[in-house]
Image (cartoon, grey):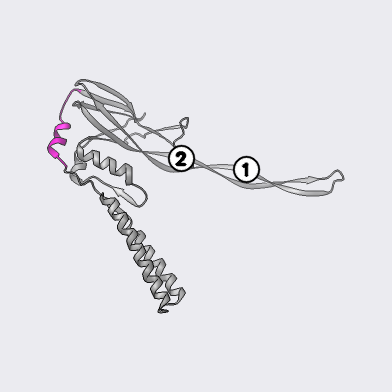
Amino acid sequence: MTEVEKNNRNMYFIAIFISKIVKYLYLTQKYTMKKLFTLFILIWGFIYLEAQNTYYPQAFFDKKLARDMLGFGNSTIEGVASTKQKNNWGIKPLLGEKHYAPKGTVIMLFPVTPYFEEFYDMRRKYENKKTTVYMSEEAFKYRVEALTDDHGRFKFEKLKPGKYYLETIVNFTATASYQQQTGTSDAYNGYGAYMYSTPIYSTFFYGYSAANRESKFVEIKQDGELKEIKL
C-alpha cells in the first residue's frame, strides 16, 4: 500500500470516529443540535486542511546516475512550446487556437531515472486539488533549462543518448464569454394589442490570465541524433 493510499484510509477511519463522537454527544444530550452542527463543521474543516497533503517519491535518488545521464554528448532536442485553452470539461480541443510560449519561458529537462519514474507515476495517479507531489530538492537540482525565443522555440544541445522528460508552464491570455440582457422584443396581435415581451441577450467576451502545464518524454537512441518535437 502506497503512502497516499494509507493516508486516504486513515482519513476515512478518522471521519467515522468523529461521526460516532458527534452522535454520542447528541444522544447523551451534552450538546444542543446547534452546537453539534458547529462542532461538526469545525471538525470537517480540520479534516479538509489535513487532507492538503504533499508527497515525495520513496525511491532512492541516485545522483551519480542522474549526473551521468546529463553528461555531455552530441545530440540535440529542439522544438516549440505551445498550449491550447481548455474547454468547460477541462479538455484541450483538437482544433483549438494555439498559444505559443512567451519569450523567456523556462523549459526544464530531467533525466528519466528510476526516482523520476516513481515521481511521475505518483503525480499522474494522485495529484489533484488536495494532493501535491514533489521531487526532493536534491533531485530537482539535476535538470537542464532552456529559454524560449519570440516564437516559442527552444533547444537543448550536447545531450547523451537516453530518455528525458521535458516540462514547462505556458502562460497565455484565455478568452471567456457571458450573456447579458440588453433589451426586449415586444409582440403584438393583429389588432395591435400587446401580447408579450421576449428578452434580448448579447454575448460579451473578456480575457483572463491562464497557464497550462505541457510536457513530453523524449528518447535519444543514438549519439548525434537531432530530435524535433512539439511540447
Residue visible at 21% across and 37% down? 143
> Which residue is under mark 1?
202
Which residue of the protein is positioned furthest toward the right in this rendering? 191
Residue visible at 39% across and 71% down? 22
Q: Position of residue 116 (x, y in %)?
A: 23, 39
Assess whether residue 70 is covered by the magenta stretch: yes
Range of magenta residues: 61-74
Q: In whole angstroms, how far apart are the C-alphas of marks 1 and 2?
A: 20 Å
In the picture, measured across the screen, residue 5 lies left or right of residue 138, that is right
Q: Residues within 10 Å of mark 2 (few under 14, many from 20)?
A: some
- Specify the quadrant of the image occupied by residue 28: bottom left
Tag 1, which secondary structure?
strand
Q: Closest to the observer: 138 or 180? A: 138
Q: Is residue 106 visible?
A: no
Amino acid carrying label 2: it is Ala
Q: Position of residue 114 (x, y in %)?
A: 20, 38
> Which residue is under mark 2?
174
Tag 2, which secondary structure?
strand
Q: Position of residue 19 (x, y in %)?
A: 38, 67
Of the two numbered discs 1 and 2 on the same chain, state the one appearing first in sequence. 2
Q: Residues within 10 Å of mark 1 (few under 14, many from 20)?
A: few
Q: Is residue 217 visible?
A: yes
Residue visible at 28% across and 41% down? 121
Assess whether residue 213 is covered by the magenta stretch: no
In the picture, measured across the screen, residue 46 lies left or right of residue 180, that is left
- Specify the quadrant of the image occupied by residue 209: top left
- Specify the quadrant of the image occupied by residue 215: top left
Q: Is residue 161 above or below residue 102?
A: above
Residue visible at 36% across and 67% down? 18
Q: Is residue 109 above or below residue 46?
A: above
Amino acid carrying label 1: it is Ser
